[in-house]
Image (cartoon, rainbow, N blue to C red):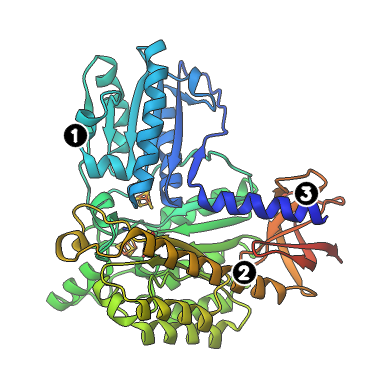
Amino acid sequence: MKQLIQDIDILNEKENACETVKTSLEQDTGQHKKMYIESYGCQMNFADSEVVTAIMQENGFDTTATPEKAQVIFLNTCAIRDNAEQKIRHRLKHLNAMKKHKPALLIGVLGCMAERLKKKFLEEEKVVDIVAGPDAYRDLPKLVAEAEDGAKAINVFLSREETYADINPVRLNSNGVTAFVSITRGCDNMCSFCVVPFTRGRERSRSPYSILKECQDLFEKGYREVTLLGQNVDSYFWTEREDIISLKQYQKAVAQQDLADLEKVNFAQLLEKVALISPELRIRFSTSHPKDITDEVLYTMKKYENVCKYIHLPVQSGNSRVLTLMNRTYDRDWYLNRIEAIRRILGEECGISSDMIAGFCSETEAEHQDTLSLMDIVQYDFSYMFYYSERPGTLAHKKLTDDIPVAIKKRRLNEIIQRQKELSLKRNQMAVGQTYKVLIEGFSKRSDAFLQGRNTQNKVIIFPKGTHQKGEYVHVKVHDYTAATLFGEVVN
Ligand code: SAH
Ligand code: SF4
Ligand code: F3S
């Protein structure tokens, strides 16, 4: 068991650092062509790849897990940090070599880097045939046809309405138990460091009817957990009026006329509707924004056992001056007040995680210390941690100076990572002796004699298989831990 624990910890650390997902689905629905898709970046990109697969399947393409078998290769790209883009450039070099042996092969770049670079992509990377932004996926069959005719095909139009609501995603890399469901697209927040508002466009909310239908379908197919996705799920806001698809638009309309009777759904109400599908269906969501997460959401989480007691609430920095420069629109006190509300309403047990950026423009040593002290106060279970990478076109790029030397950024990042490791260990140690309800997701990565699943707080728990299988709920008593994983035995 000890060796297994060590192996798994190394695996988990690697996994967190790596943001590439290669398709494992080998489809054969009788289509005459094959496509291969690789996804980079966030969960929203992975969810989008499932939409792309559905659109392509409707138009003559099956998905293959082997790039060599494909007539079309898509890279669904991320632009969040420079190293994310370097990874894509590196991958394109490799594909270039492949194309030399197979000239008819088409290479399409999708997603955020495609949107950021637009036609520059076609000029810079000769190997690319198709460029499509996140709102242009319905156009892919046409773009592929154009590329087949020898043209360079591009659509990077950003839409105010597109939510792909009517498209039934084809699940890639599915364990058959957990699935992602997009509820909003785009982002209106304009955090000064962030490229997302430029690559994904304006924020819009998907119809609750199509969200509920997708979740209900998943449940009926045997899925037992859905993660509702958006850059800022708390600002989810839908009305029956097709021209009003965000809270901001609604508030503007209210100021102009009386809309009291309009049917409308906010995030807490959506959460409740999904929770009511079945007590056997777990619900998670990501990402929450500190400025928007309301007590109403926290009380809804409390009311339904199947809404998981875990919140990803990225703080970015623990210092109020830096938060102002980041345009996060909250300060340290506001954030800590939200944490206090989570602890008051959902208790110490609720899992909390964060994103942190080290070495943002002009950050002093003392301000960096504020991030570390905030981590101590919150006691995060887990964090995604980065050092600042300037992105062309963002507010920070235009207005601030990226003046912290890389060596210092890296040192500060390491201090943050070290602190998080201590906190994760401490939080996981608290789990020893506790019994948790676990949804089994499949075999542990290291051994088929063990299964793995998560508790409501989103902690991975590994335990001997016994007679259990994926999709089942079991109660597991924890007897060991690392910073990333808990280990236990099933109890009755
Ligand atoms: N919508 C989410 C974040 C999406 S991007 C939110 O508001 O929290 C995921 C994370 O990448 C961010 O939380 C941030 O920590 C990090 N990130 C974004 N832009 C970055 C940049 N330019 N340099 C370093 N990290 C960045
Ligand atoms: Fe980027 Fe901020 Fe929007 Fe998150 S909320 S996607 S960090 S602009
Ligand atoms: Fe990357 Fe775009 Fe997601 S920039 S993090 S793939 S929204």
Label 2 neighbour load within 10 Å: few <14, some 14-19, many 20+ = some
Identified by mark 3, the residue type is Gln
Tag 2 and tag 3, C-beta contact below 8 Å: no
Image quarter for ligand 2 equals: bottom left
> As displayed, is residue 195 above or below residue 34?
below
Q: Amino acid at mark 1?
A: Lys
Q: Of the residues under marks 2 and 1, which one precedes in the sequence?
A: 1
Is any part of residue 471 visible from this angle?
no
Q: Is residue 287 above or below residue 119?
A: below
Q: Report the front residue among 389 and 227.
A: 389
- Residue located beneath label 1 in the image: 119
Using the numbered discs, state the Cα–Cα distance from disc 2 to disc 3 in whole angstroms. 21 Å
Q: Quadrant of the C terminus?
A: bottom right
Q: Position of residue 356 (x, y in %)?
A: 42, 67
Q: Residue furthest left?
A: 256
Mark 2 vs 1: CB contact within 8 A: no
Pick whichever, 201 or 20, lies toward us: 20
What separation in Å lies between label 2 and label 1 (alpha carbons)?
A: 43 Å
Q: From the image, tell me which residue sits under label 2.
A: 457
**Disc with the residue nearer the chain's start (2 vs 3):** 2
Query: How far across and how far down the image is residue 276, in percent?
Result: 56, 66
Q: Relative to 201, is 419 on the left or the right?
A: right
Q: Is mark 2 within 8 Å of ligand 1?
A: no
- Residue 469: give its label: 3
Residue 429 located left or right of residue 410: right
Q: Position of residue 271 (x, y in %)?
A: 48, 68
Which part of the image, by quadrant, shows the N terminus? Answer: bottom right
Element class at badge 2 = loop
**How many angstroms separate mark 3 from mark 1 (CA)?**
49 Å
